[in-house]
Amino acid sequence: MVFAYLAKGHTYEESREKLGVGVSTIKEWKRLKNETGSLEPRSKIRSASKFKCDELKAYINGHPDATLEEIATHFGGSKSVVHNV
């Protein structure tokens, strides 16, 4: 519907006001359609975890007072990954 409205010569701002879709969302949809030919969401490509459970447990046993940030830095990952492991 958004692309049909834009094809009639309306601006992003007019589309936002009329259809209630944010300009940044419209631009992202247009970029996605131009790059992939579709509006289907891309699958998330996730890399393998840098945290091996046995190595993480050994590190924590050796450093019981380590913060999430220190653990993440040691393994080259993020605090949120450490928290979720």
Image (cartoon, rainbow, N blue to C red):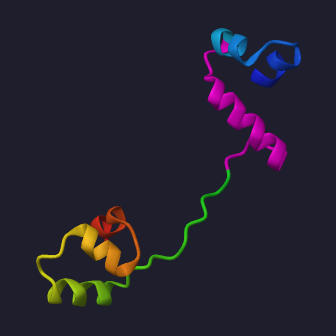
Residue at image location 28% in from the left, 65% down from the top: 83
Residue at image location 32% in from the left, 64% down from the top: 79
Q: Quadrant of the C terminus?
A: bottom left
Which span is picked out in magenta? Answer: 19-41
The percent position of residue 38, horizontal first and vertical second, equals 80, 44
The percent position of residue 21, horizontal first and vertical second, equals 62, 21
The percent position of residue 67, horizontal first and vertical second, equals 19, 70
Residue 32 among those drawn in magenta: yes
Quarter-of-image position of residue 3: top right
Residue 65 sits above or below residue 26 on the image: below
Residue at image location 19% in from the left, 83% down from the top: 60
Taking the image as shown, residue 78 lies to the left or right of residue 48, namely left
Residue at image location 81% in from the left, 12% down from the top: 10
Residue 50 sits above or below residue 67 on the image: below
Magenta span: chief secondary structure: helix
Taking the image as shown, residue 16 lies to the left or right of residue 31, namely left
Taking the image as shown, residue 2 lies to the left or right of residue 70, namely right
The percent position of residue 48, horizontal first and vertical second, equals 51, 76
Residue 74 among those drawn in magenta: no
